[in-house]
Image (cartoon, rainbow, N blue to C red):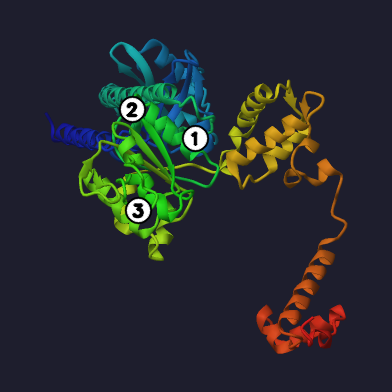
């Protein structure tokens, strides 16, 4: 073997090593194939190179990565099986050598990359990329024609590289297939979980509610303390019901306590019970709600309204599962799950010293946030239909549909009272309807729009702003008893601007000096 042969072998080994290193870098096939072509260009003087892959579904062969081609040229490089040199190689699985592309009519130059070049000076080599007996693509290179170069050696080298690429593609396809299988399995399990634990007592298909259903499904299996948070009317009690009746405590008692509805003087007795003679009117022993809920669940609604003294006793129950009745000395132990709910900002109450931080952390073990209705508008019509059906039965009506204008009004309203407000609106509309249809005028005035009522703005924007400005100036002068300096300070403007606004609107500050 000559020194020239040794040099060529060392060069090939170096190339193959560089390519193997590149193929091990990433699972993204595009990221690893681009360095492969770059290595080819650096080692063998390749001017252009492409790596094409076959799409079995469409039968199209397209360039996956390329060297020496512009993005538009890469996009044009598409072939069918048997079309052009590349299509023929993929179809037959045999390599092809075109010493001069100008001499072969099968060479299409679909990419247009050789346009304007002397084609008699360009050689084209293409080898198949195979996984087993299956051809998955092709590797091709352009190089300057040189009659002293052995195309046989070049084809052997390209075939070796194509085999390495095929192994990399197979490994990545296997990894992608496994990842896709796991994704599909995860989605299937999530769908099964949603179907299994979609609470029958809660209406909603919106994405935001699906997240709530997932949390209910997870926490129902445990005895964890739950804190349900959300605005008034979002359905916090329904969530508590769903958790209890999907848990192993479903056959046990479900005791509800509205902490805001009970006076502070009786809340302790209601929660923990009392002994006979514990206070005036305590003529007999009475069990509290915690004692009655033993073996089941207690739902403490409006937990943010508890007094400080009751918070301390509740903390002990959560920590030790024990308490004494009011006026009693016997320690009672209970097996009860606690679900609390509030529409108040507990963190702000802690800052104000109105809610115990240690109690907050005991309650906030598994928080569930209920989205307001304005954030789950996809459920509005579903809920409206449910309430129509409900109140049809209660009031012996036969409402068959909701008119389009009424639907528009329902969808455009911001629902500060949430689901409870929607239910009240639908009940009212069911009662008012006389033709088995809910129309826009059956809905409360708060939902009425200009289109539904035939009322429109009579002022232009500048007129409305002028009127608002005049009203604010007059109010400030009234409060300051006509003192221009104080009025200006209240409005956050200078005395000079205040004077200009008074003059503009024709206001006499003296008439406010008497406190009118």
The residue at 39%/57% (across/down) is 307
Q: Secondary structure at mark 1?
A: helix
Q: Of the residues tagged 2 and 3, which is closer to the observer?
A: 3
Mark before the other along the chain sequence, 2 or 3: 2
Residue 439 against residue 155 in the figure, above or below: below
The one of 216 and 66 positioned closer to us in this rendering: 216
Mark 2 vs mark 1: which is more N-terminal? 1
> Mark 1 = which residue?
209
Instruction: For the residues labelled 2 and 1, say whether their Cβ atoms are less than 8 Å apart.
Output: no
Measured from the top left, where is residue 474 in percent x and y?
A: 78, 77
Left or right? Give the position of 244 relative to 466. Answer: left
Residue 199: % across, % down: 46, 27
**Side of 354 where 394 appears, left or right:** right
Q: Which labelled disc corresponds to residue 3?
A: none
The disc label shown at residue 252, or none? 2
Q: Report the residue marked by disc 3.
A: 279
Dot 2: within a 10 Å radius of its alpha carbon, few (fewer than 14), some, or many (20 or more) residues? some
> 57 or 47: nearer the eye?
57
The residues bearing labels 3 and 1 have C-alpha atoms spaced at a distance of 46 Å
Q: Quadrant of residue 253?
A: top left
Q: Residue at x 39, y 24 (%)?
A: 193
């Amino acid at each position: 073997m000559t020194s020239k042969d040794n040099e060529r072998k060392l060069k090939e080994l170096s190339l193959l090593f560089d390519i193997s290193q590149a193929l091990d870098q990433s699972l993204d096939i595009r990221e690893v194939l681009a360095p492969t072509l770059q290595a080819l260009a650096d080692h063998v003087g390749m001017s252009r190179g492409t790596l094409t892959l076959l799409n079995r579904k469409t039968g199209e062969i397209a360039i996956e990565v390329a060297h020496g081609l512009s993005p538009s040229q890469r996009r044009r490089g598409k072939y069918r099986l048997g079309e052009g040199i590349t299509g023929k190689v993929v179809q037959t699985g045999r390599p092809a050598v075109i010493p001069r592309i100008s001499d072969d009519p099968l060479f299409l130059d679909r990419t247009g990359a050789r346009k304007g070049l002397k084609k008699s000076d360009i050689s084209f080599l293409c080898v198949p990329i195979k996984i087993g007996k299956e051809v998955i693509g092709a590797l091709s290179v352009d190089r300057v024609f040189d009659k002293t170069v052995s195309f046989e050696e070049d084809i052997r080298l390209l075939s070796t590289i194509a085999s390495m690429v095929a192994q990399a593609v197979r490994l990545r396809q296997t990894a992608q297939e496994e990842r896709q299988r796991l994704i599909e399995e995860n989605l299937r399990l999530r769908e099964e979980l949603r179907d299994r634990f979609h609470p029958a007592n809660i209406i909603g298909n919106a994405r935001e509610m699906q997240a709530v259903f997932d949390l209910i499904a997870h926490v129902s299996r445990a005895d964890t303390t739950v804190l349900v948070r959300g605005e008034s009317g979002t359905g916090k009690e329904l969530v508590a019901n769903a958790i209890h009746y999907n848990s192993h405590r479903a056959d046990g008692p479900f005791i509800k306590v509205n902490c805001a509805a009970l006076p502070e003087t009786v809340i302790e007795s209601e929660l923990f019970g009392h002994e006979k003679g514990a206070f005036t009117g305590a003529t007999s022993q009475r069990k509290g709600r915690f004692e009655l809920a033993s073996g089941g669940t207690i739902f403490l609604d409006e937990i943010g309204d508890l007094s400080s003294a009751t918070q301390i006793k509740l903390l002990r129950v959560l920590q030790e599962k024990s308490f004494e009745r009011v006026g009693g000395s016997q320690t009672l132990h209970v097996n009860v799950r606690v679900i609390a709910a509030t529409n108040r900002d507990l963190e702000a109450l802690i800052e104000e010293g109105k809610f115990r931080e240690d109690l907050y952390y005991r309650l906030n073990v598994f928080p569930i946030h209920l989205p307001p209705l304005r954030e789950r508008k996809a459920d509005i019509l579903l809920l409206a239909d449910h309430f129509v059906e409900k109140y049809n039965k209660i009031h012996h009506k036969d409402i068959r549909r909701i008119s389009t204008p009424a639907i528009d009004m329902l969808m455009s309203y911001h629902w500060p009272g949430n689901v409870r407000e929607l239910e009240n609106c639908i009940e009212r509309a069911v009662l008012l309807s006389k033709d088995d249809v809910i129309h826009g005028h059956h809905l409360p005035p708060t939902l009425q729009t200009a289109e539904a009522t035939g009322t429109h703005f009579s002022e232009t924007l500048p007129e409305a702003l002028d009127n608002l400005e005049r009203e604010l100036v007059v109010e400030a002068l009234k409060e300051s008893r006509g003192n221009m300096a104080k009025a200006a300070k209240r409005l956050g403007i200078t005395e000079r601007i205040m004077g200009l606004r008074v003059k503009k609107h024709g206001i006499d500050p003296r008439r406010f000096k008497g406190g009118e």
